[in-house]
Amino acid sequence: MLLSIIVIGFIILWRKTNWKAVEKENERYYIDGYHIYYDRKIIQQMESKSSQIH
């Protein structure tokens, strides 16, 4: 009984979520396909290489 209530609640929340808005919000955190928090070491290396070239 409790499990069915949880599943139904999850389905209702899933259907009411505006997934396009979520995706648009998440795009703010990516630079050239890299996540600005999780891939910050890679981004720093890319920025340091590009600053050495200029």
Image: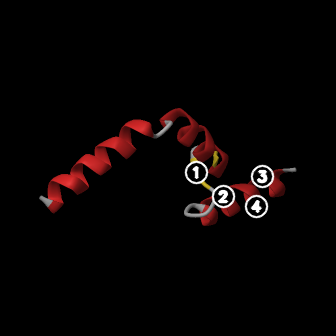
47 is higher (above) or lower (below) than 18:
below
Measuring from the top left, give residue 24's x and y in whole percent: 60, 38
User: Which of pointers 3 and 1 lies earlier in the amino acid sequence?
Assistant: 1
Q: Which residue is mark 3?
A: 50
Quadrant for residue 2, please give it: bottom left
Residue type of the residue flagged with mark 4: Ser
User: Which of pointers 4 and 1 lies earlier in the amino acid sequence?
Assistant: 1
Contact? badges 3 and 4 (CB < 8 Å): yes
Question: What SS does tag 1 mark?
Answer: strand
Q: Which residue is mark 2?
A: 43
Question: What SS does tag 3 mark?
Answer: helix
Circle 1 residues within 10 Å: few <14, some 14–19, many ≥20: few
Q: In 3D space, how far apart are the residues under numbered discs 2 and 1 (Cα atoms)?
A: 7 Å
Q: In the drawing, what numbered circle is on residue 34? A: 1
> Foreground residue, 14 or 43?
14
Q: Which residue is mark 4?
A: 48
Measuring from the top left, give residue 17's x and y in whole percent: 46, 40
Picture mark count: 4
Tell which tag, 2 or 4, sits nearer the viewer. 2
Q: In 3D space, how far apart are the residues under numbered discs 3 and 4 (Cα atoms)?
A: 5 Å
> Foreground residue, 18 or 9?
9
Measuring from the top left, give residue 30's x and y in whole percent: 62, 48
Contact? badges 2 and 1 (CB < 8 Å): yes
Measuring from the top left, give residue 34's x and y in whole percent: 58, 51
Residue type of the residue flagged with mark 2: Ile
Tell which tag, 2 or 3, sits nearer the viewer. 2
User: Which of pointers 2 and 1 lies earlier in the amino acid sequence?
Assistant: 1
The answer to whether residue 32 is seen in the rendering is no
- As drawn, the residue found furthest toward the top would be 20
Residue located 16% across and 53% down the image: 4
Task: State the quadrant of the N terminus.
Answer: bottom left
Residue located 66% across and 58% down the image: 43
